[in-house]
């Protein structure tokens, strides 16, 4: 059986440059009122997909 030597972990250097967070559109909550015009007929849905 071979023995493994324990090595101390090396710590990463702390980051000097602050991270920039770019917000994603899915993060914001918009109150979208659902109109009847927003609904798509099933046949139109599949037609838009090209199927």
Image (spheres, grey):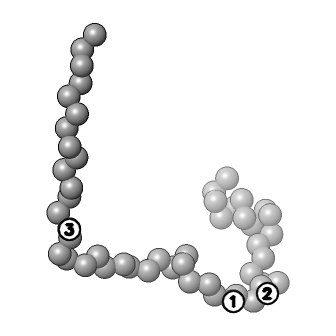
Q: Callout 3: helix, strand or loop?
A: loop
Is residue 15 shown above or below 28? above
Q: Which mark is residue 12?
A: none
- In which quarter of the view is residue 29 placed? bottom right
Q: State which mark lies toward you, 3 or 1.
A: 3
- Is 2 rendered above or below residue 8? above
Give the CA distance from mark 1 to mark 2: 12 Å
Residue 31 occupies which quadrant of the picture?
bottom right
Q: Earlier in the sequence, mark 2 or mark 3?
A: 3
Q: Secondary structure at mark 2?
A: loop
- Residue appearing at x 20%, y 28% in the figure: 5
Most foreground residue, 15 or 27: 15
Checking the image for residue 14, the label placed there is: 3
In this rendering, the label closer to the viewer, 1 or 2 = 1
Gap in angstroms between the C-alphas marked 2 and 3:
51 Å
Between 19 and 48, the one lying in front of the other is 19
Say which residue appears at 19% left-offset and 50% top-offset: 10
Task: Kindly indicate the quadrant of the structure image that contains residue 15.
Answer: bottom left
16 sits left or right of 50 in the view? left
Residue 16 coordinates in the image, percent (x, y): 17, 75
- Structural distance between the alpha carbons of marks 3 and 1: 40 Å
Vertically, is 13 above or below 31?
A: above
- Residue under numbered circle 2: 35
* Quadrant where the N terminus is found in the figure: top left
**Mark nearer the N terminus (3 vs 1):** 3
Dot 1 falls on a residue whose secondary structure is loop
Give the numbered dot on residue 31: 1
Q: Residue at x 63, y 87 (%)?
A: 30
Counting from the top left corner in percent of width and height, residue 46 is at: 71, 59
Labels 3 & 1 near each other (Cβ < 8 A): no
Location of residue 40 in the rendering, given as x and y in whole percent from the top left corner: 76, 72
């Amino acid at each position: 059986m071979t023995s493994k030597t324990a090595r101390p972990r090396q710590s990463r250097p702390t980051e000097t440059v602050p991270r920039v967070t770019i917000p994603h559109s899915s993060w914001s909550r918009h109150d979208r009122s659902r109109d009847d015009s927003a609904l798509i007929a099933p046949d139109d849905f599949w037609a838009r997909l090209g199927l």
